[in-house]
Image (cartoon, rainbow, N blue to C red):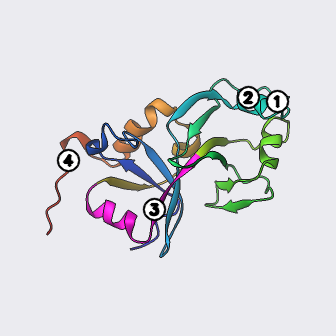
Amino acid sequence: MDSLKNHLLIAMPSLDGSFFERTVIYVCEHDEKGAMGIVINRPIGLSVEALLIQMDLDAEANLSDDAQVLIGGPVLPDRGFVLHSPEKVWTNSEAVSDYCTLTTSRDILNAIGSADAPSQFKVALGYSGWSKDQLEQELADNTWLTIKASSELVFDVDYEQLWTLATKELGFDIWQLSSQTGHC
């Protein structure tokens, strides 16, 4: 299977009632060892500004109330991950695409609270991870649909609208799909 790095995983309606109900996950890494991604549409009810204050970091910049901390996934939920535009690289930064970098070091949080903040960012706690061949099996089981990610979908679409807009990008009505696969 080709790498799904820089793609979105869109939860199928069959996941309703689970942790991943109507989630959209930005895939940051996908290779023969497994996959890693960040849920980009599930706010935890804490603003980024409030998080910075809790961490005793400066929050000098006027952060929008729309900048919410996200639940990135069930793995390491106390660890921070920042998806951001690539104007600058911080201590633990890795390019995911030409428009998105993943950083896990505290120095980016200092920058977010200042005039040095990246122009676009999402802060998440935790990540979503899959072991070798696990994501491929979930795709075969019709758990996820995939589309190529875009800067607009990753950074610009409102959290509540992202799942709906991402499903529309597929070009069909997701509610008409069956969760049953046609193979043995």
Whole-angstrom CA distance, mark 1 to mark 2, is 6 Å
Whole-angstrom CA distance, mark 1 to mark 4, is 45 Å
Foreground of the two, 98 or 160: 160
Whole-angstrom CA distance, mark 2 to mark 4, is 40 Å
Contact (Cβ within 8 Å) of mark 3 with mark 1? no
Q: Which residue is mark 3?
A: 130
Foreground of the two, 33 or 165: 33
Q: Name the residue located 57 percent from the left edge and 38 percent from the top edge.
A: 70
Whole-angstrom CA distance, mark 3 to mark 4, is 24 Å
Residue 80 visible somewhere in the drawing: yes
Q: x and y percent of residue 50 in the render?
A: 72, 26
Nearest to N terminus: mark 3 or mark 1: 1
Residue stretch rendered in magenta on the structure: 126-142
Contact (Cβ within 8 Å) of mark 3 with mark 2? no
Q: Which residue is mark 1?
A: 59
Q: Secondary structure at mark 3?
A: strand
Nearest to N terminus: mark 3 or mark 4: 3
Q: x and y percent of residue 54 in the render?
A: 76, 30
Q: Name the residue located 42 percent from the left edge and 53 percent from the top edge.
A: 9
Q: x and y percent of residue 61 in the render?
A: 82, 29
Q: Which residue is mark 4?
A: 177
Q: Secondary structure at mark 4?
A: loop
Q: Name the residue located 64 percent from the left edge and 60 percent from the top edge.
A: 98
Q: Which residue is mark 2?
A: 49
Type of the residue with mark 1: Ala
**Does 55 sit left or right of 171 as displayed?**
right
